[in-house]
């Protein structure tokens, strides 16, 4: 093998951790939550920093594209983590009186992973978005 | 359990106002051990709700996946002058509440 090919191959394997390989796949915990109903990608936007030095407190923002009227609004937003011991991190229940479907909070993350937000709409449909994050020091749950 | 609520003191009718809640709470995960190796019991705020003049406008189920001193920001429509009442409860059954008045013109 030529040195150039070897280096190119090496760079390729290092660039993407396996966890981010299938970026578009739905988190199994989120799929389970929807009880078989289709969860489509879109309408939801998750904002996470790309890198967190410390997983103990990571700012997260969720925005859902919805007019928030009585007939068409977001009923709830659910947050899922791939690697936390409790995968369902939080559930937020909104209604037409929210005016705007936007939530900001801070989460704990046990390691680099993909965070998924699922929105349940008043018309019965589910939408999701996910965002990858690299956590250098994960929230402590190891026995130390 | 002290909490800090930030909402605008006054708003126009129908305006979407930002509500920020910060509660002082350790949100103990239940996975940490103390100095002698015993697991520290889980103690997190499991439920947080916001009522606007008695009507629930926001509710959240939290878990150990939410950072210590939980912070939540959401929005609500200013309907009429009144009070926003926040209540929460943790695993130990301790309840907390806080009120914030809003003037709607």
Image (tube, coloured by chain):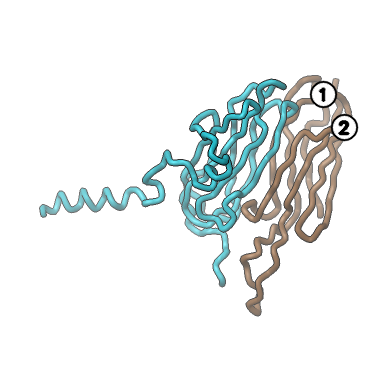
Q: Are marks 1 and 2 in contact (CB under 8 Å)?
A: yes
Spatial separation of the CA atoms under disc 1 and disc 2? 10 Å
Q: Which mark is residue B66?
A: none
Q: Which mark is residue B79?
A: 1
In brown, which chain?
B
User: Which is nearer the N-term, disc 1 or disc 2?
Assistant: 2
Residue B37 placement (x, y as % from top left): 63, 77
Chain of residue at mark 1: B
In cyan, which chain?
A
Seen from the viewer's position, the closer of residues B57 and A109 is: B57
Residue shown at the point (71%, 57%) measured from the top left: B44
Q: Which mark is residue B53?
A: 2
Q: Secondary structure at mark 1?
A: loop
Q: Is residue A75 above or below residue A136?
A: above
Chain of residue at mark 2: B
Snapshot quadrant of residue A62: top right
Q: Is residue A53 left or right of residue A5?
A: right
Q: Is residue A18 left or right of residue A77?
A: left
Rendered-image quadrant of the N terminus of chain B: bottom right
């Amino acid at each position: 093998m030529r040195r150039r090919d070897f280096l190119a191959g090496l760079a390729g394997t290092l660039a993407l951790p396996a966890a981010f390989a299938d970026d578009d796949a739905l988190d199994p915990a989120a799929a389970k939550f929807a009880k078989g109903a289709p969860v489509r990608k879109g309408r939801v936007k998750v904002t996470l920093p790309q890198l967190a030095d410390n997983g103990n407190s990571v700012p997260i923002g969720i925005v859902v594209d919805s007019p928030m009227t009585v007939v068409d609004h977001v009923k709830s937003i659910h947050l899922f983590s791939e690697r936390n011991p409790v995968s369902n991190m939080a559930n937020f229940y909104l209604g037409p009186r929210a005016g705007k479907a936007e939530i900001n909070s801070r989460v704990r993350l046990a390691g680099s992973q993909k965070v998924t937000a699922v929105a349940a709409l008043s018309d019965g449909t589910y939408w999701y978005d996910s965002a990858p994050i690299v956590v250098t020091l994960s929230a402590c749950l190891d026995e130390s | 359990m002290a909490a800090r609520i930030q909402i605008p003191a006054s708003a126009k009718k129908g305006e979407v106002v930002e509500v920020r809640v910060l509660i002082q709470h350790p949100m103990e995960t239940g996975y940490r051990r103390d100095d002698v190796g015993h697991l520290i019991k889980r103690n997190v705020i499991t439920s947080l709700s916001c009522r606007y003049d008695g009507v629930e406008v926001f509710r959240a189920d939290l878990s150990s996946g939410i950072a210590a001193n939980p912070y939540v920001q959401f929005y609500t429509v200013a309907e009429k002058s009144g009070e926003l009442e926040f209540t929460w409860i943790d695993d130990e059954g301790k309840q907390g509440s806080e009120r914030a008045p809003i003037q709607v013109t």
